[in-house]
Image (tube, rainbow, N blue to C red):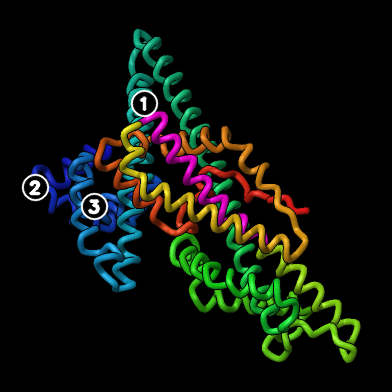
Amino acid sequence: FTSYILFNEIGSKGEKAIKKLHTKPSVKLFKKIFGVSAEKTYYQILGVPDFADEKTIKKAFRSHSKRLHPDKNPDPKAAELFMTIKDAYTNLLKQGSQEDQMMKQMESNLEDFQIIQRVGSMSYTHVFEFVMHVFGAVFNTFKYMTRTERVDKVHQAKTVYGQQEWTTLLQSQASIEVFIRSGKNGKVQEQATKWLHPLKRAIAYKAKTTFKAIYPEDKVKEEVHQLKRRLLGGKDPNSTSGGGGRGANSSPEERRTAERVEKATTELVAFGLVHRIVHLIHKRVLVEVLVEEFSKKSENDLDKELRDLNDLITTYTEELDAFGEATDLAFALEDILSEDGKVRKAVRYHFRKELRMREPERLEWIKALLQAPWHEYDMGAYTEGLAKYSMG
């Protein structure tokens, strides 16, 4: 049906005519009616034809990367555009754009129903063909709806994980900033101050990527401010000294607030430190899967990155242990490490296409992933819920 429209509208005028056709109100209306977005498709974002093959897509992405990659272009707008292009590139290589999938499904359904309509107006000699096409159309529709439901569940799980993580990170910043102003408990304050900088970097990254449309910079500040006010029992955080104090002149309410702020800060800092280590452990498991099951020779190529990763895990684990001793907390990291088999299965499935890429593309991909900060590793893509790390 779509092919028929395009042929009658433009004949053989070529790619420029196709692009021009997509700007027509009638085509935009057609897209809207049949569930196809009138916004730019992934192909248009990369600047390649809708029929481009994998080689053309990769070539276009490399061309854009040379101009827009943050390492080569310091302009923040360039970095933002690079993330958009990277998202389009990733989706096209994995499964194609959502618009393409929906259009293909619509074309298939229309073809089936057109045959049904024609057969219905013909003689009974075609009843068998008619019945078979009806069955095929119903089966394909059911299959499509089932797949859509499954995709929606995965998307919903990722959304819940992302929202939980985002809320926890914002709560951590609010609690730490309130606690630092109080000047109480030097041991907790020292670690809280140290954790605040990487915490803000993680929040800034997620605000620019996952939550850009929902949480612009001003709204992030306002959300943190409201969390501080809630923590202080409704008081303005700018007019208080970090939740009161514990001195003899402090009121019972101020002392309770101070204790609540300290407890919340301790728990949230502990969560953040463990959460960071878990991200790095998942990275290490991914490398182990790659080396043991897909490319043994990659072990030598990744020697430096793997040593740096292990050094980071060791350093952060020692930091966590020191914080636990200072606050009389014990962390059950053994429970995390014992889930190695589940993590292997999850990362093997989620990164199945990347793991099967040819060299040197696969090596470039894994190196970039290992060198990126912990908060840029999207653990929520295959983790159904935010892990609750046990503390004693």
Residue displayed at 21% across by 64% down: 67
Specify which label sits upstream in the sequence, 1 or 3. 3
Q: Quadrant of residue 234?
A: bottom right
Q: Amino acid at mark 1?
A: Asp
Viewer-side residue, 371 vs 88? 371
The residue labelled by disc 1 is: 112
Q: Position of residue 23 (x, y in %)?
A: 24, 58
Q: Position of residue 232 (x, y in %)?
A: 76, 79
Left or right relative to 280: residue 245: right
Determine the secondary structure under disc 1: helix
Magenta run includes residue 274 = yes
Specify which label sits upstream in the sequence, 1 or 2. 2
Q: Amino acid at mark 3?
A: Phe
Write down the region rendered in magenta. 270-295
Asked if residue 74 shows in the view, the reply is yes
348 up-or-down from 246: above or below = above
Foreground disc of the pair 2, 3: 3
- Within 10 Å of disc 1 (Cα), the crowding (few <14, some 14-19, many 20+) is some
Viewer-side residue, 356 vs 56? 356
Specify which label sits upstream in the sequence, 2 or 3. 2
Q: What mark, if any, has residue 13 been given in the picture?
A: 2
The residue labelled by disc 3 is: 61
Q: Position of residue 231 (x, y in %)?
A: 74, 75
Determine the secondary structure under disc 2: loop
